[in-house]
Amino acid sequence: MANTKTVILKIKRQDNPNAKSHWEEFELAWHPGMNVISSMMEIARNPVTRDGKATTPITYDSNCLEEVCGSCAMLINGRARMACSALIDKLEQPIRLEPFTKFPVIRDLAVDRSVLFENLKTVKAWVPIDGTYDLGSGPRISPEEQEAAYPLSRCISCCCCMEACPQFNDDTGFVGAATISQVRLFNTHPTGAALKRERLAALIGDGGIQECGYAQNCVEVCPKDIPLTQSISEVGGEVIRQAVGDLFRK
Amino acid sequence: MAATASPVAPVPVKGGVAPLRAGQGYSFWLRRLHSLTGIVPVGAFLFEHILISNASAIGGPIAYARQVRFLASLPLVPILELFGIWLPILFHALYGFYIWYRGETNVGEYPWTGNWMYAAQRWTGGIAFAYILWHTWTMRFTGIDLHEFPGASFGKVQSEVFQTPLFLFYVVGLIAASWHFAYGIWLFCAKWGIVSGEQARKRFLILCLAFFFVLTGVGLASLTSFRSHALQPTDSAGASMVEAGPGTTN
Ligand code: HEM
Ligand code: SF4
Ligand code: SF4
Ligand code: FES
């Protein structure tokens, strides 16, 4: 019985950043517990399309296979999500796999997400502790503060929140929810707060926090359930207070 | 493993969404001004227009004429109108279309409530714009001047409201503007960090929804009161009779 059941995958492929994309269809024997990454591993073992043509294995990013590294994000049946946690049995068939649409394709499903890294650098998303001498132990962080910070610290830089955001596109150059939420994380850290003013100021530039239109897709799509819209709201309040304050003080 | 994939020569990846431009541009201020003008003065005007001035029509033609006369008697009406409503609404509307144009509505792929509301904020803005253009053209800029002849106001509105297609246009315009404003208050409070918590935003949404029903309800009551009164004069002679007081109406 079970071995007559099959899984059909339609995968959008592209040989290099400048090539045209095309679709290929694959049919795999079903077995329990399959996910999108394991299916593509099977394709790699026997890269033959559904109509019997030999092809190349699918290129994609992945690493941890347990939704903590953030590398395997792609469009699965049109929606941004992590491939390693996308169980085949819970997906409607044929399963459509596409690369993110708002990031340059490197090959097949692998895209260049360095824009998030650039944005995180611009807002200085780190705790500044580098120095030439021992700074001693840091300040204590209360359990309440830890509990508020922990969910924010779970971001895996997958960029799902940016792909799904209607405001994240070529016209706006919007920074996206992940970076704004990291600003909140590092601003609430007692040592990280040293750079608070600079982080908030960075978000006032073009493509900054103002571009958010509160569609709230980011918070729906985030695989780590990060309270992104709350972050945007709170950082938004701080940004406007600092910006207006500086009009009078600077 | 079938190693059919030959390594591709590295092609420099380009394109994609631009990173944050910290310290550049002034879109932050324009965007926040757009947000603010939606509340004051445009929203405040709508509040007055529906809940005070138009609601006075429920009290009949004389009460309505007095309200219009009161508004026309305010000091510096042309300046009040120009800076209190024409310029702000023109800015909010034109910049609103610009914001609309730059967003990529994606309710097809992500059909979630917040995303629908994001789309609805644009559509209701567009409908309100069309309605406001027509409404100000026929009421304010053409036909008998109501600032000079407040007594003709009731009749002038009746001449439109008694035509069913125009009556329906009034209803559509009312609902669109009320929704846009009510949800706009929610958006404003989220963006400015006034109501930021997940639960708080949910509760506040109910409040804004209630406000939408109040606006629409009072607006509908005013509209139907125009239809339930006998036709009033729309000429200057009749207008002074209405203003003169009881006995001229029913
Ligand atoms: C009846 C008159 C209007 C009122 C009272 C009004 C009020 C508001 C309010 C309170 C907001 C929320 C502010 C915010 O997003 O932070 C808003 C947003 C918006 N309005 Fe209006 N508005 C009106 C007319 C229009 C018109 C004619 C347009 C043109 C399309 C428009 C387009 C928009 C857009 C696109 C947004 C969303 C902005 C964003 O997502 O950032 N509005 N409006
Ligand atoms: S709330 Fe909407 S517009 Fe804002 S970052 Fe999230 S998805 Fe984008
Ligand atoms: S905030 Fe969520 S969706 Fe966005 S990059 Fe981080 S983990 Fe991914
Ligand atoms: S492989 Fe690490 S998140 Fe999917």
Image: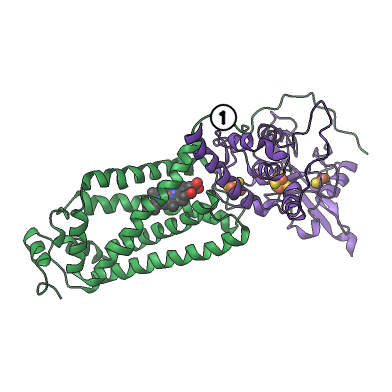
Residue B200 placement: quadrant:
bottom right
Q: How many marks?
A: 1
Where is the N terminus of chain A found, in terms of image quarters? bottom right
Q: Nearer the viewer, residue A85 or A2?
A: A85
Q: Colour of chain B?
A: green
Q: Is residue A51 left or right of residue B192?
A: right
- The residue identified by callout 1 is B23
Q: Nearer the viewer, residue A209 or A62?
A: A209
Q: Residue at x 69, y 41 (%)?
A: A100
The reply to whether residue A203 is in sight is: yes
Q: Residue B176's spot in the image, x, y percent?
A: 40, 58
Q: Is residue A61 left or right of residue A99?
A: right
The reply to whether residue B126 is in sight is: no
Q: Residue B192's spot in the image, x, y percent?
A: 52, 48
Q: Residue A134's spot in the image, x, y percent?
A: 84, 31
Residue density around tag 1, few if under 14, some if 14–19, many if 20 or more, within 10 Å: few
Q: Is mark 1 within 8 Å of ligand 2?
A: no
Q: Residue at x 75, y 54 (%)?
A: A147
Q: Residue B104's spot in the image, x, y percent?
A: 55, 44
Chain drawn purple, letter? A
Farthest-out residue, left: B237
